[in-house]
Image: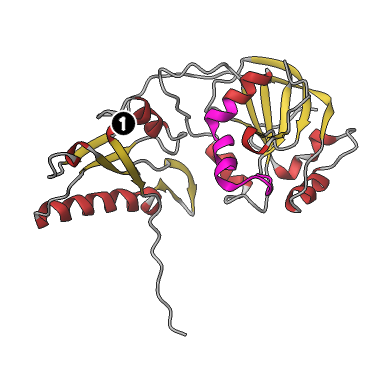
């Protein structure tokens, strides 16, 4: 059964995809392993050389911070390498999606980015259109609506083989680009504490130019995250103009490529402009949303 790129499914480009792939499919619940909670969807499941179908939601039994950590891209890659999965097929709950599939599909035409020193193994990452997700479950004895209902009720998801192979042929064009983080220091005044830094961070990128929405192809990003960058600039200007002296130093960091997978933050964490141990806190500002006061 051929799948139409953009209509049935998308191929993610934040990881280098394999050029050719033919592998069986296993549905592995949430595809989540959380040792602290003794929770493991993949326990006893043979995924070596297979594609792992998973539900891209978070089981309510796992606390939010742990769910966020173990569903982060870095932890996911470690997990797939450990279990030997060669690809993933993510299924999403349409109720939980911020954007309609048409917007998500249009975004596939924008170039992806990865750090030059990243060395992750090639892997196919597919996201299915929820409206067409039942194509995966034909002949399995399960339906997408059944799994949706279980997930929405906070119940465990079953793990079962899918009677299908996923075959893919992918071609990728590469080119080198450069995008800078911007960092600045507001020195502290305390003889001892000035060597400790409180970081104030925000990302300076948005989506750029994409598919037109109501005839406008420029995605300005006024909230996401020009609002955060403006806040950093305003704080810096206010401190400069007031002449105030702080005990600790401030480290202003405007990071790039957040929309491409937190790449600027990832690079700064690996290559900080000051010793990482001297950063005692970070206040990150993203989408500083204004709320109006209402009288009742």
* Farthest residue, direction bottom: 296
Question: Which class describes the residues within 10 Å of circle 1: few (<14), some (14-19), or many (20+)?
Answer: few
| Residue 234 percent location from the top left of the image | 22, 54
Front one among 249 and 58: 249
**Does residue 160 lie above or below 232 as drawn?**
above
Front one among 231 and 12: 231
| Residue 42 percent location from the top left of the image | 73, 28
Left or right relative to 254: residue 42:
right
> Which residue matches tag 1?
277
Q: Across the whole image, how many numbered discs are drawn on residues?
A: 1
- Report the span colored magenta: 58-77
| Residue 48 percent location from the top left of the image | 73, 16
Q: Secondary structure at mark 1?
A: helix
Residue 100 visible to the viewer: yes
| Residue 74 included in the magenta stretch of the image | yes
| Residue 240 included in the magenta stretch of the image | no
**Does residue 243 lie above or below 132 as drawn?**
below
Left or right relative to 131: residue 275:
left
Residue 220 visible to the viewer: no
Quarter-wise, where is residue 13 in the image? Answer: top right
| Residue that appears at 79% across and 44% down | 147
Quarter-wise, where is residue 53 in the image? Answer: top right
């Amino acid at each position: 059964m051929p799948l139409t790129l953009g209509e049935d499914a998308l191929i993610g480009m934040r990881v280098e995809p394999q050029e050719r792939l033919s592998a069986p499919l296993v549905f592995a619940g949430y595809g989540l392993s959380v040792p602290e909670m003794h929770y493991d969807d993949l326990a006893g499941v043979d995924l070596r050389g297979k594609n792992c179908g998973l539900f891209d939601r978070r089981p309510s039994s796992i606390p939010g911070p742990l769910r966020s950590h173990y569903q982060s891209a870095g932890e996911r890659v470690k997990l797939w390498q450990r279990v030997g999965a060669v690809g993933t097929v993510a299924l999403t709950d349409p109720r939980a999606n911020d954007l309609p599939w048409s917007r998500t599909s249009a975004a596939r035409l924008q170039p992806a980015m990865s750090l030059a020193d990243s060395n992750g193994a090639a892997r196919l990452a597919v996201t299915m259109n929820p409206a067409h997700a039942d194509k995966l479950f034909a002949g399995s004895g399960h339906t997408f609506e059944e799994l949706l209902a279980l997930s929405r009720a906070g119940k465990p998801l079953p793990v079962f083989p899918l009677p299908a192979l996923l075959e893919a042929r992918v071609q990728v064009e590469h080119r080198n680009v450069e995008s800078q983080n911007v960092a600045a220091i507001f020195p502290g005044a305390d003889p001892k504490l000035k060597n400790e830094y409180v970081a104030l961070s925000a990302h300076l990128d948005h989506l750029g130019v994409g598919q037109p929405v109501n005839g406008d192809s420029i995605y300005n990003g006024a909230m996401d995250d020009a609002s955060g960058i403006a806040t950093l600039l305003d704080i810096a200007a206010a401190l400069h103009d007031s002449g105030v002296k702080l005990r600790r130093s401030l480290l202003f960091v405007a990071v790039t490529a957040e929309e491409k997978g937190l790449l600027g933050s990832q690079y700064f964490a690996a290559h900080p402009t000051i010793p990482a141990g001297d950063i005692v806190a970070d206040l990150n500002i993203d989408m500083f949303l204004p709320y109006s006061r209402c009288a009742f």
